[in-house]
Amino acid sequence: MSKKRNRLEVIKDILEVIRNRSGRIKPTHILYKSNLSYQMMEEYLTELIQKGFIQEKKTEKSKTYLITEKGINYLQQYRMISEFTTSFGLE
Amino acid sequence: MVQLYLVPRWFFGFDIAMELIFAVVAMVLASFAYKIYKASEEEEVRLFSVSFALISVSYIVWAAANYFIMRTLTGDIFELNLTNLLSTSYILSLLHMSLFILGLITLTYATLGLKNGRIYYLFAGLGLIGLVSSSIPWITYQILSIVLIASIIYHQTVDHSCYKNKKSMCISLAFILLFLSRLDFLFAAKTTFAYILGHILELSAYLIILNSLMQSIKGWKK
């Protein structure tokens, strides 16, 4: 049985989904790929925007999310972040 | 008479060197945590960094207090109390204790993942007022440290049972050694041995933390 994802893993999964879609994605795709409820996804997206990991682009017809340089850096440093927070019980 | 601790003359100098080592390790950890914070933007990691920076400064202040005492007193065993301490040394000792407790409160707040700033200020206020107003600040300081470190160990043990991570086990062991050193320091006003053993236990804890950190950095660079 796979263990429950922690918050940092969920953030990594969302950012990976966006990066794998050429850095731009619609919220429905995030919902589908990240395996979250709509409400949880909205909370995570708000947090990621506040942290500067993603940007929201709104047009009249649709809404898309773009991964930023900071978001890409998070993915590159993810193993280090995860190991550090786990080692020191910061999760 | 407010007694702090007994120190054998031959150990003066060694204790200051050890306190400076603790300060360096704590600052390395704080700097590394800050780097992790910049990449993750996690508030707990920022607080963790702040807590170890405070702890690092507290050790520098402690070393400074002991240095002042070393230059002032004579004899084979020093009995540190309010009547024979220079006021500068006593104030430095109190500053060291306050910074260390503030660091531990910040660390506990970060480790427990609390999100309410008012709880933090309440804990910090209670801890510092309790320490400063105590008639036996050294004992109050050790008891507060013991309670705070015990809560961190408990949280880490619960976490470790979830993750079964070797590094988190090493960090828990380091905190257990810190806990034992604080327990031992309670008797430092009675025997010089307690002061020496406390320093050795604390040194072991910081060397374990440093080793874990170095191993991790090596692993990430591969």
Image: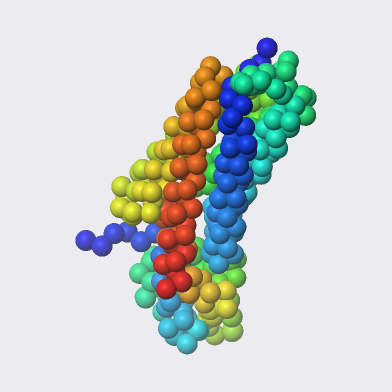
- Depth check, front residue: A52 or B33: B33
Q: Is residue B174 above or below residue B70?
A: below
Residue at 55%, 57% (x, y): give it: B33
Tell me what residue is drawn at x 63 percent, y 36 percent. B13
> At which x and y percent is residue B205?
46, 43
The single residue placed furthest to the top in the displayed view is B1
Q: Quadrant of residue B154?
A: top left
Q: Quadrant of the N terminus of chain A?
A: bottom left
Total labels: the figure holds 0
Q: Is residue B126 visible?
A: no
Q: Position of residue B193 (x, y in %)?
A: 49, 24
The x and y percentages for residue B182 are: 50, 30
Q: Is residue A75 above or below residue B112?
A: below
Q: Is residue A57 left or right of residue B172?
A: right
Quadrant of the rendered image containing residue B125: top right
Q: Residue at x 47, y 27 (%)?
A: B183
**Which color scheme is applied?**
rainbow
Q: Residue at x 54, y 62 (%)?
A: B36
- Residue B83 location in percent, x, y? 73, 15
Q: Is residue B85 left or right of residue B11?
A: right
Quadrant of residue B130 in the image? top right
Q: Is residue A3 left or right of residue B55?
A: left
- Farthest residue, direction right: B87
Asked if residue B220 shows in the view, the reply is yes
